[in-house]
Amino acid sequence: MIIIELLIRGALLTLGVVIVWRTMLSAVRTFVLPRSAPDSIALFVFRMILRVFRWRTKHGSSYEQRDALMAMYAPTSLIALPLVWFALVLCGYAIIYWALGESRIDEAIMISGHSLLTLGFRSSAMLGLALIEFTEASFGLILIGLMISYLPTMYGAFSRRETLVTLLDIRAGTPPSAVELLQRAHRIRGLDTLEELFREWEVWFAEVQESHTSLTPLIFFRSALPQHSWITAAGAILDSAGLYSSVLDRPPLPQAQLCIRGGYLCLRHIADYFQMPYPKNPSPTDAITITREEFDEAVATLRASGVPLKSDLDQAWRDYSGWRVNYDAVLIQLAELTQAPYAPWSSDRGLPQRTV
């Protein structure tokens, strides 16, 4: 009997240590590690809360109502995640105390809770357990400190992201449209200025890749205006660069092609965190969600505005499709994941519930 009891206590001790260690590892990956490291605990919390919010959005009568509800998703997840960590640490240490000598599980839970929250009203009389209580109190303070330092960093990255998203309204309208961007640039004789625009967005893609893979809740932070979205803005810029490189009868613009590469690499890295499927090495002839009819309609709109176009539209379509295939799948999936507002050629793909 004694041997069996020792084995049970040893198993419980191991279980408690694993729970505490795994929880602290989750906090480090989410708050401290400066790279994308998918964590099962964080993903579970985000997905469960997302299911609740998506269930609630089904009852919204308009996109504005659904957007207002989804705007609460990221803040709610940020509050829920530390609470889940605290609950796991509390349970893990309670199991440890119980395994090391506390006879009653309710007393072990009380000691664990008072130690984690540094209340100090309950403590064990045994020196060994008291030393473990000190480590639990330290973990509690570390989690609180990480959360306090984490929020300013996240909102700083959010502010930097939204600057260019808001400025895009001037060039591409609302919702952002690649055709509108090229039309306006030609209208003000500013096609030459697009090189600088694509350079700015290449840097933007690099910053978003760095911030949205290390601070993943940023993916779900919605813009101040319901019609704006970081993912639809990214789609408009990528399509603008793709149309410029394939359709416009102008000298080649390497910066547009670099912007496309920076964009699809950014979106792919974010998609990797959520384990989204997409072709790693797509062929230029692979199918995309944009039809030839939609492409021809965009070309006709540009021609009516006087934009200089290439004569061989069949080759232009093949060239555009060859660019689009690199980011098509991840763009559509991220637009759906974030419940992005309506925008042509991105969030409108198979999403009829979004209205203009």
Image: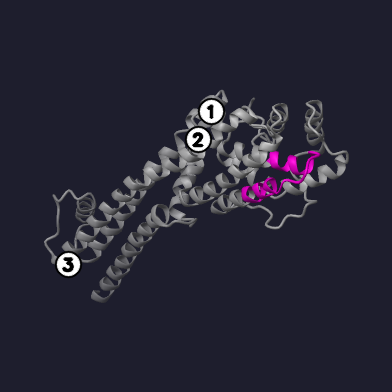
Vertical side of 331 occupied by 228: above or below: above
> Where is mark 2, residue-wise?
222
> Where is mark 1, residue-wise?
226
Question: Which residue is depicted at the point 60% across and 48% down?
Answer: 267
Relative horizontal placement of residue 237, taking residue 30 as reference (left or right): right
Chain part drawn in magenta: 239-263
Which residue is outermost to the top?
Answer: 61
> Where is mark 3, residue-wise?
128
Question: Which residue is depicted at the point 39% across and 46% down?
Answer: 81
The quarter of the displayed image where residue 235 is located: top right
Q: Is residue 310 visible?
A: yes
Question: What amino acid is labelled 2 in the image?
Answer: Arg
Task: Tell me how far mark 3 sits from mark 2, CA to CA.
Answer: 48 Å
CA neighbours of label 3 inside 10 A, class few (<14), some (14 to 19), many (20+): few
Most common SS among magenta residues? helix
Question: Which residue is depicted at the point 71% across and 33% down?
Answer: 182
Q: Is residue 289 visible?
A: no
Vertical side of 39 occupied by 54: above or below: above
**Eye-nearest disc, 3 or 2:** 2
Query: Which disc number belongs to residue 269?
Result: none
* Magenta stretch holds residue 256: yes
Task: Tell me how far mark 1 sits from mark 2, CA to CA.
Answer: 8 Å
The C terminus - image quarter: top right
Question: What amino acid is labelled 3 in the image?
Answer: Gly
Q: Secondary structure at mark 3?
A: helix
